[in-house]
Image: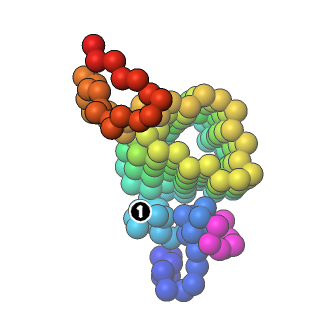
Amino acid sequence: MWKQDKHEGRRSMSDEAEGEGSGSSSQSARPETGEDVSAFVGKGVEFKGTITYSGTVRIDGTLDGEIHTEGVLLIGEEAVITAKVTAGTIVCKGKITGDIHAKEKIKLRAPAVVSGGVKTPMLSIEEGVLFNGTLEMAQGVREVQREANLHPVNLPAQPGIRRVNA
């Protein structure tokens, strides 16, 4: 009765975030990770404090404080978050003010508004998102090996070009 069946044609937050549907914001059975949402802060709910969890949490209300998780944080379109956020993956359609650190990735979907420092190895920003802040993408940078010594290439002699061997 309480658990939504994924075959009922309902869309999750990740489907909404990807722009694939226009399902109700209260329907969020399966985020992009395939896990069930373990907690939900609904529209009209105001929370002050620190949230620490594992798994997936969706926020549609107002939160002031801190959020810490290795899991997924889904932020609905009407959410207003003023917090220091640390998560594995963040999908945001709401408003975040504060420093954000995602260990895996951040997806900002319209009409999201983000103000603050962002640190993540992967960032996706949809057209229509307002981003005011700093971005650091330190993880995932690959070093390219380059040959230190350069050797001259022997080219065939061309008329009018004089080659000098040193």
Q: Which secondary structure is most common in the magenta stretch?
A: loop
Seen at 36% across and 23% down, the residue is 163
The picture places residue 152, in percent across and down from the top left corner, at: 29, 27
Please state which amino acid type lies under the numbered disc 1.
Answer: Thr
Residue drawn 40% across and 23% down?
162
Q: Position of residue 149 (x, y in %)?
A: 25, 22
Task: Decide which of 109, 8 is in the foreground and name it.
Answer: 109
Quadrant of the rendered structure where residue 150 is? top left
Decide if residue 165 is on the left or right side of residue 17.
left
Q: Give the range drawn in magenta.
A: 19-27
Q: In this view, does 98 lie above or below 54?
A: above
The residue tagged 1 is 33
Helix, strand or loop status at disc 1? loop
Crowding near pointer 1: few (<14 within 10 Å), some, many (20+)? Answer: few
In this picture the colour scheme is rainbow
In the displayed structure, 158 sits above or below 57; it is: above
Left or right: 36 as drawn, with respect to 144: right
Question: Does the image show residue 52?
Answer: no
Q: Residue at x 71, y 53 (%)?
A: 127
Tell me which residue sits at (46%, 64%) in the image: 32
